[in-house]
Amino acid sequence: VTIPDAVTANATQTAANTYDYVVVGSGPGGGPLAARLAQAGYSVLLLDAGEDHATDNVVQIPLLQTSASEYTPITWQFFVSHYDDPTVAIKDPKFTWKQPDGSLWVGPNPPAGSTPLGIYYPRASTLGGCSEHNAMVALYPSEADWEIVANITGDSSWSPSNMRKYWTALENNQYLTPGTAAAATHGFGGWLDVTLTDLRLVLRDARWLSILRGAATVMGTNLATSVINTVDLVASMMVTDVNNASPTRDNTPGIYQVPLSVTNATRARSSQRMMILNTAKKYKLTVQLSTLVTSVIFDRTYSTPRAIGVRYIQGSHLYRADPNSGSATQTSSGSFFARREVILSGGVYNTPQLLKLSGVGPAAELKALNIPVVLNSPGVGTNMQDRYEVTVTGSLATNFASYDGCTFLQTADDPCYDKWFNNSTDHGIYGTNGVAFGIFEKSSVAQNNEVDLFVGGLPANFHGYFPGYSTTADIHTWAYLVLKAHTRNNAGTVTLRTTDPRDMPNINFRSFTVGGDLDLQAVYEGVQLARTVFNHTITPDGPFVEQSPGASITSENDVKDWIKSSAWGHHASCTVPIGAASDPNTPLDSKFRVKGINGLRVVDASVFPKIPDFYIVGAIYVISEKAAAVIIQDAKST
Ligand SMILES: Cc1cc2nc3c(=O)[nH]c(=O)nc-3n(C[C@H](O)[C@H](O)[C@H](O)COP(=O)(O)OP(=O)(O)OC[C@H]3O[C@@H](n4cnc5c(N)ncnc54)[C@H](O)[C@@H]3O)c2cc1C
């Protein structure tokens, strides 16, 4: 058929380019969903702009997670704004400029002729999406996160008691014993391996152990004995399972071990990727990579437009956030069609961009760029949210023993790599992301009596994201990451810069615009907590010397100014939110359907009305499973 649509004229449908479902994006939102639809017997085409690099060492080795996020075969480099006012924005030491010769400059006083880019925000474009470069922290969201959606939409299938089953289905827990009470709501047969940091690493490193003891002292954790010489005693300072289903879990401060999406047997990164590949071997799942979807095709002969396919261009690294895009070549272009539905899972920036390029978004913005309006949906690209994060760092005179001998793959004979790869009972430091424990705490401005601060420690010199940040790691510095969860700001937007689908959109968080003073207060309290913990840490080398914020930043005002100018986030979300059926400002209904369009859903970090939990990917995995269940149920009833 020829599609009567001005936007997408001349698209021709054939049996060969038609599937039951077309899913755009193989990240945590789209990947599990595509596999589940295929497992249910439908033919599914899963498209992703990236290539597959998951077997590359830098992607597989958990400790190299920061390098993974700057690994050019898979990275998309976005530059975002935190503030509208450029004089405020450039106070951030991470603010990045493009120099006249094309190279990047990070920080103040750029050379004359430099143009401002903004704050670096890495994404992964690859089979698996950001699952393949993220820090692998795998948390189950708080109950209130689901209640919010249930209350807004009136859809009780979002109730916490119903949502947990999706986690049980996807999890392959590797730190609890099946059949025990503690394991009751966990899954042991799912596709996501979830384990903990090997506590032998903490036990063997006097500095790391002293840090945990400092945290335990401040948090009042029971210290069984003054001599900690077994893994069990190390474990006794922490709650083992932060993903437990206790009704008081979301209100209970403490020190918790941090679950990681890592496979215990190999201590390698785990994600939905293996399920996608295994499903493609057995079911009607076609995975096509290096394919950038440029618009959705609509059949507008119905009174309600119907999404029936997508247009694409093919070639590696075509999107201009890709550092290799300058030499990228488009090899072909075309269209794919969906008998049933098109599902967009391109992530928080790309899904609203794709909707707008397809004519679904705020009418005024589309008209200004001469994009024919298929549906005026003013909420597309609004409501963007993120965390606020800063680190309090301190250095010692000597290195953490955990890193002894490690060359971080910079030499052919890296002993830490050798141990990770060859030692099946003790994979060493490369088998963790470095985050063995985290403090969960309630700030004075926490809502609903829920914990809202995470103060997680790792042996690294980490100050947030800027080009080259992953190469600045040193091995005698400890970073306490202070992360504010349940943030209030929803003033962020994703707007089109051009109509070229290869271009990045404008991304502006407008940090601290809504509820800013309250969130700032919470982050301030997190910084003070991290400092208190450092002050109670007695290492073999004496006290840590604070590097950041630094000895000169002490008054509440100064600390708050420092937070405002340097805080970052890495869980951007909520740009195509779910809302009540009657709410014109929320593009999606509770079944992930684009309101006002048939055959089109969104399933990724964009869909949340409010940013969930402390770390977001667990929530995205859960909604991917939920969406699959909802779509299969709908398909069976039609
Ligand atoms: C450095 C970093 C570390 C992180 N660490 C953690 C962590 O430890 N724990 C946690 O919970 N969260 C973490 N996150 C966040 C988390 O990984 C992401 O929020 C999550 O992966 C988002 O999932 P998604 O499905 O929405 O999109 P993505 O993971 O971004 O996947 C989208 C996919 O869609 C593809 N795509 C986009 N547009 C198109 C198009 N037009 N055509 C074809 N394909 C397209 C992309 O190539 C990509 O593969 C981290 C994020 C970053 C940046």
Image: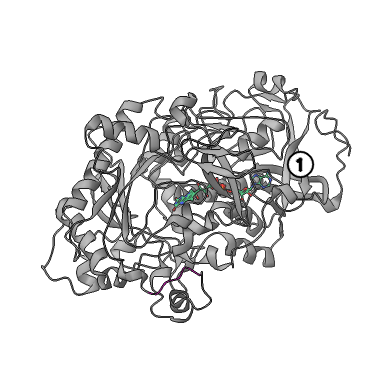
- Quadrant position of the C terminus in the picture: top right
Instruction: Judge whether residue 407 is colored magenta.
Output: yes
Q: Secondary structure at mark 1?
A: strand
Specify the principal SS of the magenta part: loop
Q: Which quarter of the figure is the N terminus placed in?
A: top right
User: Residue 561, percent across and down?
Assistant: 32, 31
Give the camera-side residue of 572 and 327. 327
Nearest to the observer: residue 576 or residue 421: 421
> Viewer-proximal residue, 390 or 540?
540
Find residue 431 and report its image quarter. Answer: bottom left
Q: In this image, 276 relative to 143: left or right? A: right
Q: Measuring 38% from the left and 30% from the top, which residue is drawn there?
A: 488
Q: Name the residue: 48% across, 23% down.
A: 85
On the image, numbered disc 1 is attached to which residue? 309
Give the x, y percent position of residue 592.
57, 38
Amino acid type of the residue that numbered disc 1 sits on in the rendered structure: Gly
Q: Is residue 566 above or below residue 72?
A: above
Residue 557 location (% of width, % of height): 26, 29
- Residue 37 on the magenta segment: no
Q: Which residues are magenta?
A: 405-409
Q: Is residue 317 above or below residue 588?
A: below
Q: Residue furthest front?
A: 112
Residue 620, horizontal then vertical, whole percent: 50, 47
For the residue pair 187 and 608, the one nearer the viewer reads as 608
Name which quarter of the figure residue 473 lies in.
bottom left
